[in-house]
Amino acid sequence: MLGLDLAQVASAVGGELCGDGKAPINGVVTDSRQARPGDLFVALDGAHTDGHCFLREVRAAGASGALVMPDRGERPEGFPCVVVPDTLEALAALARHHLGRLQVKVVGITGTVGKTTAKDMFAQVLGGPAARVHAAPASYNSECGLPLAILASPQESRVLVLEYGVNAPGEMARLLSIAKPQLACITALTPVHLEGMGSLEVIVSEKTLLAAAAPPDGVVWMPEEAAQQVPSDARWPARLRRTGFGPGAVQILHRQPGAFRVTLPRLGELTLPVYADHEVMLAAIAVEVGFELGENVEALRERVQDLRRPEGRLTAHVIGAVTVLDDAYNASPAAACAALEVLERWPQARRRIAVLGTMHELGAEAEQWHRELGRQVAAVGVDQLFGVGAGGAWIVAEAREAGIDAMVADDAEAVGSLLAPALREQDVVLLKASRAEGLERMLPRLCAAARALNPAVGVQEVKA
């Protein structure tokens, strides 16, 4: 519960209260379909729809009131509202107000890949809700999402794990105006969102603003590979801790998908339920954050061996002898290569099949990066490749040059109609593309086809 009434909300955001301000505010939503009794609805003017068009619906759902802008049409009679010049700015102001009431350490995470996985890992390793650790349940990392993540934090929270996502220069500064971290992690610095960012140098500059915002008594963690992208003359108030692989650091002893045997500093040898090397690194940093916040060895060791990952981020659906690796939530060149490495190492696979779609927002370098991924497909020895969309066509063209069995399809449904009837026992299928390609739509059809090979089995989801 937010612990404010509508009049206090109006005061916090500098808005004009219209109507009764005594109703308590339980939560804050920007999607009218999510409105529940006691919520505050923030009417945002989005790219595709205007939240002001849904005031009647949120009132009928029991919302206590709404943040609205003037001259946006008729409001339901008797529905309390707070009028502000800009509802997105008011949402940020309300988040700043709520954060100021909390006695929390803010752990901020950014990077070009792995932000949401890291956010969930950190929250779990630090103990989750039972230990008064709050993190948003999804990728709430934008100018809209970050305030919602803060506003959902219970007042008794002691740690708040926040994700900072940026697609263009200037966005990180706006996010940091809402919440600055005491502890920070940059997961990776690789080419992504080049359409908005322009170059890797701009990406590094924008992402490392999070590190620069941490205070002198704070800490910034980075994998060694990411730290190497930072200019040598970069100086931040906080301490920088570079985490790498090697003797005396993080070591991978044995790679078994879902059961990596590793050695972590101060924890020793243990088993992590992960699929990829970069996930081992994120888990290691999560443990270091735990030590910084005073967690004990026994608790960290237990929690890190029981990690769960977000839905759609390299979840293995095992149906009899067929495995579908669902990594369809998003894609960038680095993330796609990491997923291919997982496919390459998957044990007891008779055929390794990759369904790769367009990686969006790569700008003028899009063709180059997709063709490079096609060469990576050949390097890891994929048995069959399906390319989806324009980017998929570039991937296929390059892979065919290296002799890979490959074909292009218009969309996920077309691939499903080709692949599902051809599935065989011990096939391992990887789904990887930007979210806009919707490869997750193939899952039901592939699972049904795999089950048809052995009707007695169900679907087992193996989540690291």
Image (tube, rainbow, N blue to C red):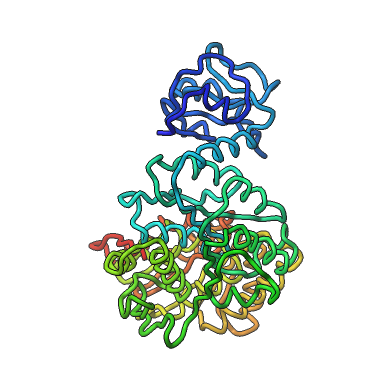
Q: Is residue 363 above or below residue 347?
A: above
Horizontally, residue 104 falls left or right of residue 331, namely: left
Residue at 54% over, 70% down: 222
**Which residue in the rendered view is the most extreme toward the top?**
77
The quarter of the picture where the C terminus appears is: bottom left
x, y (%) of residue 322? Answer: 35, 70
Q: Is residue 324 visible?
A: no
Residue 255 location (% of width, % of height): 38, 81
Residue 382 to residue 217: above or below:
below
Residue at the (57%, 48%) spot, across then down: 179
Q: Is residue 160 visible?
A: yes
Q: Quadrant of the N terminus?
A: top left
Can you say whether 138 is above or below 332 in the image?
Answer: above
Considering every residue shown, the one lying at the far front of the view is 217
Outermost residue, left side: 456
Seen from the viewer's position, the closer of residues 89 and 168 is 89
Left or right: residue 430 compared with residue 263: right
Task: Please name the residue shown 42% across and 80% down the image.
Answer: 250
Residue 303 picture location, percent across and down: 31, 64
Q: How many labels sit on residues? A: 0
Nearer to me, 167 or 339:
167
Q: Position of residue 360 (x, y in %)?
A: 65, 60
Q: Quadrant of residue 305?
A: bottom left
Tell me the residue at 42%/69% (across/down): 288
